[in-house]
Image: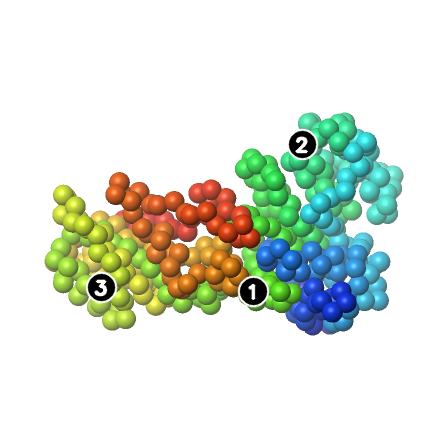
Amino acid sequence: MGTEEFLIEVKDLTKTYGRKKAIDRLSFNVQKGEVVGFLGPNGAGKSTTMRILCGLMPASSGEATVCGIPLASHSREVKKYVGYMPENNPLPTELRVDEYLRFRGQLKGLEGSVLRRRVDEVLELCDLRRSAEQRIIGNLSKGYRQRVGIAEALVAEPRLVVMDEPTIGLDPHQVKIIRKLIERLRGEKTFFVSSHILSEVETSCDRVLIINHGRIVAEGSLNKLREKFAPEVLFEVYVAGEPEDILKEILKVNSSIEKLEEGKLGEDGFQRVLFRAERNKDVTEQVAIRLAKSGKVRLREIRAAEPDLEEIFMRATQRSWEVETPLGPIQDKFAKTEQGETESDEEGSADAPEKKGKDSKNTKGKKAV
């Protein structure tokens, strides 16, 4: 193992505690410069995997390399290239922020002008200089402490940054700051990030790994995961015309398209019709063009619904919140109240991944003709 293309290479990685397997033959790669989201239910093995990759815990079996260095025999060397922010970061409450960062930099081999420069850089990068540089860590808010943890992970200029729940407990403004930080360092650093705020993972990450019961159950870009876990797509049209003519025109695009439901005819003569089709990136565009050119019907609006990362996560992990039908939650997104508004999502299971307000909705932009 160990190639220039991949910063992380994992093959059949296993960790056991007695008879229990925390992770079971994990195999995956992470390319240099990628931002990878590492997802899974509580107890799935995320933190164990992260600690092994940071050289803080030995695996029971299997192989893993970081920066081309085998972890099993050179874990101390690997630590030089990795910045780690654990979920519950044990920050010393009695130190000032700048004191702590200098202390951690010294432990990681920095000294003199290099140490001073790096502390200054991460204070600026994490927006800590003006508001928190001289403050006692114990007096900081949750958001500032999280930023101190990220600054500590970055101070020694690591090639790999591993962050376990970096946005947990933060308000939307603080989450946005961390999102911008990752975006600023995209390509320069490789990020391996776990989070239960799936809308943030969807926004920030190039690729996603989903783990359940210690095994990888899904991996790939969001589009790749949609292809695997949602082979069909729903779209709705607001159109005026005879129902038979509407269906006939749409079936000319693809005979496999199925009409699911039909709304009431409005005073303006338009009605909402919901369809299901096999996944095709151009299907809504083709339907829009067909209806726009038709002399028998008039199209006002067409929009498609794609499953967001939250729904893909539910299907991939198949726990207590597993959906009963492949497109059930997506169809629910199109459900209308009597006032014509989209119905709000129901409360999820206590074990389900955290939603983030309106960001969790999966209805994409509209196409108007």
Q: Amino acid at mark 2?
A: Ser
Cβ–Cβ below 8 Å for labels 3 and 2?
A: no
The residue closer to the viewer here, 336 or 200, is 336
Figure quadrant of residue 9: bottom right
**x%, y% of residue 11?**
69, 71
Q: Quadrant of residue 178?
A: top right
State whether residue 154 appears in this view.
Answer: no
| Vertical comparison of 358 with 240: above or below | above
- 133 to the left or right of 245: right
At horizontal 14% and vertical 43% (from top left) the residue drawn is 267
- Identify the disc placed on residue 250: 3
Q: Earlier in the sequence, mark 3 or mark 2?
A: 2
Front tag of 1 and 2 = 2
Residue 201 position within the rendered picture, expressed as x and y whole percent measured from the top left: 55, 51
* Mark 2 lies on residue: 141
Q: CA distance from mark 3 to mark 1?
A: 34 Å
